[in-house]
Image (cartoon, rainbow, N blue to C red):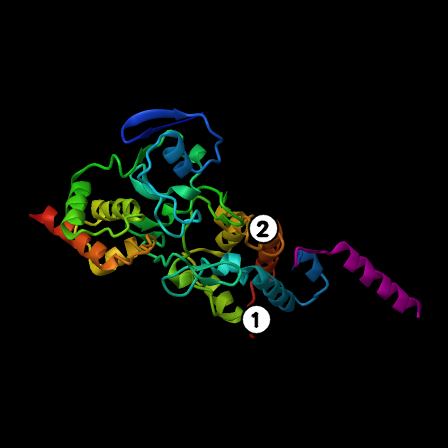
Amino acid sequence: MTNFTINGRDVTVDVEADTPLLWVVRDELRLTGSKFGCGVAQCGACTMMVDGMPRRTCITPVGSVDGASIETIEGLEGREAEAVAAAWQGLDVPQCGWCQSGQIISATALLREVPKPTDDDIDAAMAGNVCRCATYVRIRQAIHDAADSMEG
Amino acid sequence: MKRLILALGLTLAGAASAETVNGLKTADEFAGVQNDEERSVAVFQEMMKVIESPRCLNCHPRGDTPLQGDDMHPHMPPVQRGVADFGAPGMYCTTCHGSENVAYSTGDGSIPGHVPWQLAPVEMAWVGKSAPEICAQLKDPARNGGRDLAEIHEHMAEDGLVGWGWTPGEGRTPAPGTQAILGELVQAWIDTGAMCPES
């Protein structure tokens, strides 16, 4: 048994401790916004917040998050998350959308730590989130827009 | 002739008591080198077999990017060192690296893990450096984290992240020998004056 909170809700799951967190969230808890991309921590599509920090959940054994607080795209909250969502909508950032929940989690994590990031800050923080539609230019601009909106 | 046979017998006995473990000679193998300075240099050259292992060099890189794999390719994804040698804001090492190695669920290989998981500071870079350069660097408190020789021994013989180098998980070749043998070599090097090779 593993206990954790997901988007503020206490859950207990009865799965093998080495099951990846992504499997549990999608298949057991039926929150399918986080995507499977590569399975080897190379693409970022599975990114969730674990205790407030972005984490690749395809290589995170569920047993390692016992007692942790998990946020997924379905429940991401706060000033930065709202600014990111608005900026994403404003620029129509997604194309196919597969990677976008991971992109938004990583962008939100960056803005929580660096409210006014430079291009270099963005490139460093987002280096592990691959977009097969190559929406990188819009992603970077949307992060700047989100940062600007929080200043005003 | 009798003397020669006796000498040969002693040599063979000496060879039998020493050993090489996983490609690394134990400190005992250097007992036959009578001159302390020569023994110290020889022991350091043996330490270099571990220091030059990809398991050590990959996290003692030059520049701001760690290396990966037995072929020491640049880390993918292209992460950065960051101000604390722990990644950039939003992309710290812990975004992927957990407390232990985790086998991939979808195929061969694993992602390495240990707490802590981080790069050696850039002044401790080893990649591309010669044995004399690394030796001098190891003894220089300005470039070894302010460590004295006893603390250098502690780092190599007991540090958990260093020890990970011998249990690196599927898809990575362990460092030569064992951490205990490396510890004995480092101690033997220190005990013989911590001499550095000239080439």
B62 inside magenta stretch: no
Image position, residue B144 (x, y; %): 43, 59
Per the image, the residue denoted by label 1 is: B197
Q: Is residue B199 left or right of residue A125?
A: right
Q: Please give the label number shown on residue B179.
A: 2
Q: Nearer the viewer, residue A53 or B139?
A: A53
Q: Nearer the viewer, residue A41 or B180?
A: A41
Among the 4 quarters of the image, the one containing residue B1: bottom right
Q: Which residues are magenta?
A: B1-23
Image position, residue B149 (x, y; %): 50, 56
Image position, residue B20 (x, y; %): 70, 57
Residue occupying image coordinates x 31% and y 48%: A98
Q: Is residue B21 left or right of residue B148?
A: right
- The kind of secondary structure element at disc 1 is loop
| Neighbourhood count class around disc 2 (C-alpha, 10 Å): few under 14, some 14–19, many 20 upward | many
> Which residue in the rendered view is the most extreme toward the left?
A152
Q: Is residue B73 above or below residue A73?
A: below
| Mark toward the start of the polypeptide (2 vs 1) | 2
